[in-house]
Amino acid sequence: MKQVVQNYKSGELALLDVPVPGCKPGGVLVRTAYSLISTGTELMKVSEAGMSMLGKARSRPDQVAKVVQSVATNGVPATYRKVMGKLDSYTPLGYSLCGVVEQVGDGIDDVKAGDLVACAGNEHALHAELNWVPKNLYTPVPDSLAPRHAAFGTVGSIALQGVRQGESRLGEVALVVGLGLIGQLVAQLLTASGVRVVGADPDPARCELAERLGAAACGDPASPAVESAVAELTDGHGVDQVYLAAGGGSNQPVELAARLCRDRGRVVDIGKCRLDLPWNAYYEKELDVRFSRSYGPGRYDPEYEIEGRDYPIGYVRWTERRNLACFLDLAARGRVDVEPLITRTADFDDAVETYQRLKDGELKAVAVLFRYPEQAAEVGPSADAPVVSVPVVPGGARSSAPVRAAKTPVRLAFVGAGNYATSMLLPHLAQRDGVELSTVVTTTALSAANAQRKFGFREATTDLDAVLGDASVDAVFVVTRHSSHAELTRKALLAGKAVFVEKPLALTGEELTGVLEAVEESGNDRLQVGFNRRFAPLLQEAGKRFGARTGPASLRYLVNAGRLDHGSWYLQQGTEGSRFAGEGGHFVDTASWLLGADPVSVYALAPSGNEDLQVVLGYPDGSTATISYVTTGAAAFPKETLDLVADGKVLQLDDFVRSSVYDGRKRWVSSRLPKARDKGQSAELAAFVRAVRTGGPMPVPLGSLVATTAATLAVRAALAGGAPVTLAEAR
């Protein structure tokens, strides 16, 4: 089997072939489905291994003291051989995973082969294909919890034990210093227990994430924002508890705790940070300093962890194992949400590269999962993330059309002349030079006649076949109800026309496949979907000002969609699909354009009783985009607001009226009058007409249109399965 190991002397990381562990009595043999990288503890260990010998000594004075003692006892030569032998050995990494029981040892009767379990321990829950885990370091996974989420069990237990040490009470206010993986979980657990949370972290993306997941306010600990939030929430008294979830050599966390904690408050150390307590500050407030010992009672006790001797519940209510089970239960019931914390899910075969990218800072992550080759897809309703196939774009289609003769107009036909066509598309085309509105096709004669009169179409008809057979028509606009888009697009492509279809391109995977089959059959890929927002001038300009990225980005897109009027055809979900299936492509496309890639995973949550959605898209470089599509907001609030955070920069878009880019202390702002709000329709139409006229590429590559449509459709699968969906190219 394969296992991730590290040589502490050289710093070498390797995916090593090692023997399969035996299944000893008192435990179970577990085949790993997902294991979690602790981006705090493990990266610290990886970084230390890359230091010089002097650097290692400075970082671990406790080990140096042991070496000095050994020299005094055994002499220099023997101690040197012992130390070098230990350093120049492979050591394991990992301590939190979820997997399937493959074999049960003697004395185990609470699980059986095939059961899904979460496992803990830096000697037993390793980044390895198989692990032997003793009884008190595993617990069964609730049926409703996805394995990738259950893999958070150990780090969740660490956070939970820290919260227990703080003895928080309903209505209190807590400060969480450090919003990495543990800090994010601590903040969520406190919020779930009725405590208002203020977070402190220098990373604005982590602050934004914590606020999105329930924290009252977050900010840079060096800024006045955190102090102001504490003062406001506590009437100036200070927080009841401070949780130190930060690492590193700075003494700032304990100094901040002293400044912002109330009189006789509690300070709980969970992370590994410097603890030079400012004596006067802690003495004058009589602060209670507590340590949280990893996963809980039982940790470091071999009789508990290895021999399986449990502590009586009447004396020790929350042990390691009971904390592990409690956290999984909270996650299964939705009281804690770990999915937004997942920055990247990497294949286990890419483990060494993933660690290296994390170490080098190329991959900035809160949580990273390893996905193992042999996952138990049959275990539980969502044991493995479902895979939605993205249809392959045919390779034989043409990417250009013959260049038109000079001064020859581009002749356009419209199929459909409803409100969107007549208000958002035709006004831009009717006055454009070099465009001729040839024919309008509708199902009712009167609507065609109205469009002909208002916009100057040469002909009005209800006969679609006549239009598709008209050789003088260069391009067809499909602007009908959603349920007809895919079939009309397919027919127009087979007729050899360039096609502009309003979103959505398709409402099902079968419809999307049908469109691509038409592309392959006809050799015609001249297709554009009406994803206009990427063409909006304010967003285009802001994107240029933001510039290229070097690291992963976090994007938040709030769509205040509002309620539909009674009787709207958008409510006919049986035939026209859901609102998000119809509109969501706009927002997916905008996010993908800003992030410069197509999504590779989709996760979605929907509260019962309304159409609100939270959609999280994952991208190949670890970037994430969260689309909050809500119908229950205030009508006076802007419809669309967007924030993009990466590389110390922030791009903001305020409803296509104002865009801003923050870079360090500099700020660039561009704005326009609200009545001049421009969502990019004019620029998109100009690009489409230009492509038809010149024979050049369509404004958006076909592969991107297909990926956006597939991601939009995958939301339904993600909601149904209660787990993230992986987008994979069909084979």
Image (spheres, rainbow, N blue to C red):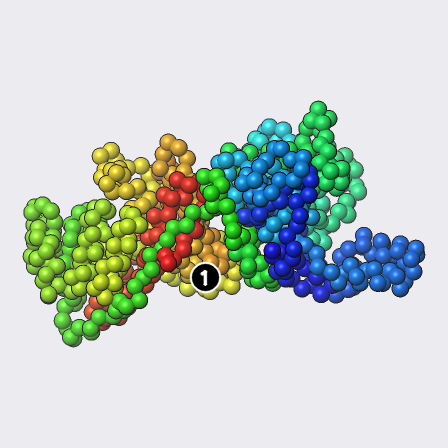
Q: Is residue 627 above or below residue 347?
A: above
Residue 366 falls left or right of residue 546: right
Does any portion of residue 665 appear in the rendered image?
no
Residue furthest toward the front?
Answer: 106
Where residue 159 sits, quadrant-wise, is top right
Q: How many marks?
A: 1
Does any portion of residue 483 appear in the rendered image?
yes
Q: Residue at x 85, y 53 (%)?
A: 66
Q: Which residue is mark 1?
A: 546
Quadrant of the rendering where the N terminus is positioned: bottom right
Quadrant of the rendering where the C terminus is positioned: bottom left
- Image coords of residue 203 (percent x, y): 57, 52
Q: Residue at x 38, y 44 (%)?
A: 717
Closest to the observer, 618 or 403: 618
User: Type of residue at label 1?
Assistant: Phe
Residue 65 falls left or right of residue 582: right
Helix, strand or loop under label 1: helix
Residue 339 falls left or right of residue 324: left
Q: Residue at x 33, y 52 (%)?
A: 709
Residue 516 falls left or right of residue 198: left
- Image coords of residue 322 (percent x, y): 64, 33
Residue furthest toward the top?
Answer: 314
- Image coords of residue 677 (percent x, y): 31, 52
- Image coords of residue 467 (percent x, y): 10, 58
Where residue 565 sits, quadrant-wise, is top left
Closest to the observer, 425 or 605: 605
Q: Residue at x 10, y 56 (%)?
A: 465
Closest to the observer, 270 or 280: 270
Give the class, few, some or many, for how many residues have Cα within 10 Å of label 1's Cα (few <14, many ≥20): many
